[in-house]
Image (cartoon, rainbow, N blue to C red):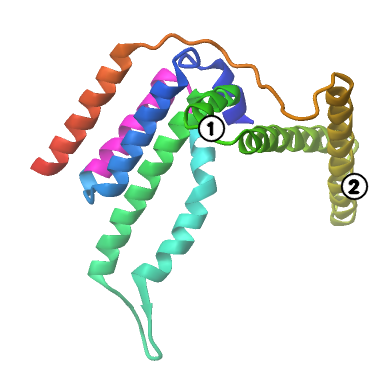
Amino acid sequence: MIINNLSYENILKNTHPMEKFLFSMGTLIITITMDKHFISLLIFIVMNSILILKIKLNSKSLLKLYSIPFLFVILSIIPLIISFDFKQISISKNNLKYSINLILKVFSAISCTYFFIISTPMNDMDIIMEKFKMPSIFRELFMLTYRYIFLLIKFSQEIFISQKSRSGYKNYKTSFNSLSLLIVQTFNKSLRHSLNADMALKSRSISNQIQFMQRKYKINKKNYIYSIIWFISIISLGMII
C-alpha cells in the first residue's frame, strides 16, 4: 500500500512517465553491465536519496520495502560464500568478494526499480506499454492484476482490523480460527467485487477491450539532457576507477 499511495502523491507524479522510465531503466542497465563496487554503491545511494529527499519516502517505509527482497538475497548469497565439505566448512575470499559485489549490484538494481514504481502512478505505466506496442490483452491483464493485488491487501487489512478489535487473536486457538476466516472472507469479498465490476462493464457495453484513461503530459527535454549527463558521468567514472 505504501507504493500505491506514494505513486499518486509524490512530487514527480506530473513528470512524463517515459522520462522516468528511461532514467531508471538506463541506470539499471548500467548497474547490471558495469562490474564495479563503487558504481553500484553510488547508484544505490543516489536512488535512495531521491526517494527520501525528493519523493519524501520516510526511511522507515524504505527499510520495510527493502526487507522484502533482503531475505531472498541473503538466503541466495550464503551458499556462494560458504563451501560445505564432508570434513569442514570454509569461506573463500574470492567468493566473498564476488558475493559482496553481487549484493551491491542487486540492491542498486532494486533501488532503480523502486524509484520508477514509486514515482509513477499505475495508469501512467499503460502509456509506456502502449509506446512499446504491447498487445492490449497484456496491458489489460497487467493493469487489472495490479489493481486486484492492492484490493486484496485492502480487504484483508479491513477484516484483520475488525477481527483484532473483537479480540480475534487473543490466543492460539482464536488466532487460527480468525486467520482461516480472514482468508475465506477476503476471497469472498474480492470475488463479489470482481463480479460487480464485470456486471458494471457489461451494462456499459464494454465487452471487447477496456480503455484506460491516460493523462496528457508535456515532454521536458531538460530531463532527457539530465539523464544523458547522468549516464555519461556514471560510465566515465566507472571507466576511470
Whether 46 is among the magenta residues is yes
Whether 50 is among the magenta residues is yes
> SS at mark 1?
helix
The residue segment tinted magenta is 39-59
Q: Amino acid at mark 1?
A: Ser
Spot occupied by residue 21 in the image (x, y as percentages of width and height): 42, 28
Q: In the image, what residue occupies the spot 50% across and 49% down?
A: 69
Spot occupied by residue 95 in the image (x, y as percentages of width and height): 28, 68
Determine which residue is flagged by label 1: 61
Picture quarter containing residue 151?
top right
Q: In the image, what residue occupies the spot 13% across and 36% down?
A: 236
Q: Amino acid at mark 2?
A: Leu
Q: Quadrant of the C terminus?
A: top left
Determine which residue is flagged by label 2: 181
Picture quarter containing residue 190?
top right
Spot occupied by residue 106 in the image (x, y as percentages of width and height): 38, 49
Who is closer to the viewer here, 209 or 106? 209
Picture quarter containing residue 6?
top right
Q: Earlier in the sequence, mark 1 or mark 2?
A: 1
Query: Mark 1 packing: few (<14 Cα in 10 Å), some, or many (20+)?
Result: few
Relative to 220, 184 lies left or right: right
Who is closer to the viewer here, 140 or 148? 140
Is residue 145 at least partly visible in the picture? yes
